[in-house]
Structure formats: structure tokens, C-alpha cells
Image: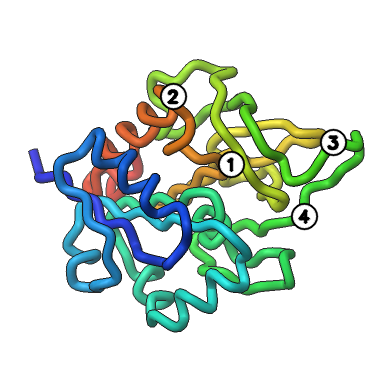
Amino acid sequence: MSKINVAIIDTGCANITSVRCAFERICDDVTVTRDQDFIRSASHVVLPGVGTAGAAMEKLAQFKLITFIQSLTQPVLGICLGMQLLTKSSQERSVSCLGLIDTKVSAMQNSDNLPLPHMGWNQLTHLKSPLFNGIDEGSYVYFVHSFAVPTGAFTAAQSDYGQAFSAAISQNNFYGVQFHPERSGKVGSHILKNFLAISATQEKIGL
């Protein structure tokens, strides 16, 4: 079996430490870095993020990471804002994103007068990705967000907060979760383990 090592892209965002600690609990080789040679050689790559899409894309441009991330071929997991950055664009200040998953990010609607941001525990439904192997329908995970990806062809899991939205998305070797697995207890840890079980070989043959 190939060695598992995780490269967490250092985007300068605030939640990197908690993401690193979550992976260190399940993997012996975890590094936070911007070194492109190191990231390219890793078996799995994580794109964390909090804050606004515009500021995050500016950081990626500053660190010369946009084209580089687009070229990665191993499994890549975007977390929270990191998931949104994998899409084509965000309605948040009309920002162009990485364009790796063929969908867009929209402001959440407040038709039921629910408070925004959507913050707290909510359920996962319509699970259809290797990320959710062994995860029960209706499992709870932790969210903090005001923008979301509508459900569509690349939805890998759904949740509902006055509207159905994509709790996870995937296309080719790129995966994204809107929730925070690092704050989601045993369910979140199981999802991260599932991510590490996805191999580049599986991606090439379409598993």
C-alpha cells in the first residue's frame, strides 16, 4: 500500500491549526506548507479556508497557487470556504474561483426567517460519495456559513436550512465539504478517514 501523507495548503486562514490537529489524529504524516514540490508529492491535499472568497483568492494569487492547485491530480479536499473556492465563482462580491467543480456559490436565502450565518449542527442526507462510506443518513456535522452551493449534478451530500444546499460536492479528484469535519466529532473524523482511503488510482479509473 502506498504511503499516506497529507499536505495542508497554507492559505494563511485561521482554522489551519484545528484542521491539522484533526488529520494528525488519524495520520502520522501531516504538513502545513506552500511548497509546491512537497504538495505535488503528497498522497492527499487539503485546501482549508475561512473568511471571504475574494480575500482567499487574493491570497492564493499572492502565493502563486491558483494554477498550481488547478494542476493537482491526487485527491484534494476543500473544507468550508475551501470547498467554495473549488467552484467556478462565488456570488460573494462576484469572485472568480478555481473552476475545478462545475458549479457556483450563491448567498443563502432566508425565506423562513432563519438567522444567518447558518451556524451549528445539521444533518447530512442524500449521501453519494466515497467520503461518506459508513456514514448514516441523517448524521450531524457542524456548519458555519452564509453562502452555499445549490444542489445539482456535482452534489455529494445535502443539508437543509430553509433551503436544500450542497453539504458536499465532488468532481474528478476534487472533493469539498461545506461543514467543518474537524469540529464534527466522530462523524467528522470518519469522513476524513474516508478521504484518506481515496487513492489517485481510484480517481483514474472513476471509482
Label 2, secondary structure: give it: helix
Which sits earlier in the primary sequence, circle 4 or circle 3?
4
Label 1, secondary structure: give it: strand
Q: CA distance from mark 3 to mark 2?
A: 25 Å
Kind of residue indicated by mark 2: Val
Kind of residue indicated by mark 3: Leu
Q: Looking at the image, which is closer to me, 87 or 61?
A: 61
Q: Residue at x 49, y 62 (%)?
A: 100
Q: CA distance from mark 4 to mark 3?
A: 14 Å
57 w.r.t. 192: above or below: below
Based on the displayed image, in which of its 4 quarters is residue 53 positioned? Answer: bottom right
Dot 2 crowding, Cα within 10 Å, few <14, some 14–19, many 20+: some
Q: Looking at the image, which is closer to me, 62 or 174?
A: 62
User: Residue 187 has which mark?
Assistant: 2
Residue at numbered disc 4: 107
Which sits earlier in the primary sequence, circle 4 or circle 1?
4
Residue 10 pos. (x, y %):
35, 65
Q: Residue at x 43, y 75 (%)?
A: 66
Residue 74 pos. (x, y %):
28, 55
Residue 117 pos. (x, y %):
73, 46
Residue at numbered disc 3: 114
Residue at numbered disc 1: 155
